[in-house]
Amino acid sequence: MNKKTQSKKILPVTSILVAFIIVGVLAVFINSCQKKHVVSNLTTFKSSNIVGYKNKPVVVDATFVPTMNLINSYAVNNNVMVYVTSSYRHSNNNLKKTVVKPASMSNHLIGHAIDMNIVYKGKWYDSKLMSKNNFSRLPFNVRNFLNEIRHTPNIRWGGDFKTQDPVHIDDHYNKNRSNWTVKFNALNNS
């Protein structure tokens, strides 16, 4: 085999290898762009019947806003005020005096959960008063507000959790661990 024939055989193999390398680099680049596109947009939520406790801002992910609007409509329908004591929490927050030990994949860490208390006719309803053991003794409007949440697909009331957390409401975003992790990483690596 002469040098000219040898170079003709090497050239296609080299071209194929270069093409594979370019395709691989492009795939990595496109994949990294897609992951960056799944960014979590935190926003301050404001509405008529959901407010932050002690005027603290209610911070949630933009994709959780429709759920918050629905919760607000339930509060309006039942003439209750919802005071949010906790919404988005940065992963560095060390919480003390919580009703329930925070979960490692908490929806609070991605802005898809709130902790709240309810005020109805001037009375404050907290975790003790909203517990399952006391549920039947709650005023109709408070019970109905919580039941509307409980009967809405993709919204969970923490009073129904195995370890009760009656001040908690979320959209079960952490059901899909992969999506939760992408959103969590977008918030904590930005």
Image (cartoon, rainbow, N blue to C red):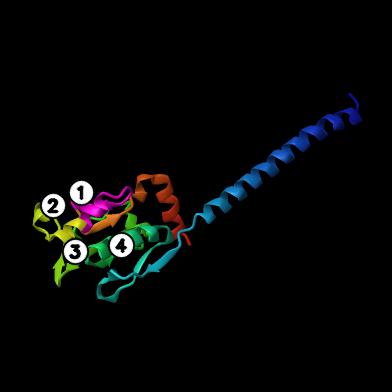
Compute the Cα span from label 3 to label 2.
21 Å
Q: Which residues are magenta?
A: 145-164
Q: Which residue is mark 2?
A: 132
Q: Which residue is mark 4?
A: 73
Marks 2 and 3: in contact by CB < 8 Å?
no
Residue 182 highlighted magenta (yes or no): no
Task: Please name whichever residue, 1 or 59, is drawn nearer the observer in this view of the structure.
Answer: 59
Residue type, numbered disc 3:
Lys
Marks 1 and 2: in contact by CB < 8 Å?
yes
Residue type, numbered disc 4:
Ser
Give the residue furthest to the front.
77
Q: Which residue is mark 1?
A: 160
Q: Earlier in the sequence, mark 3 or mark 2?
A: 3
Compute the Cα span from label 1 to label 3.
21 Å
Task: Please name whichever residue, 8 or 124, is drawn nearer the observer in this view of the structure.
Answer: 124
Q: Earlier in the sequence, mark 2 or mark 1?
A: 2
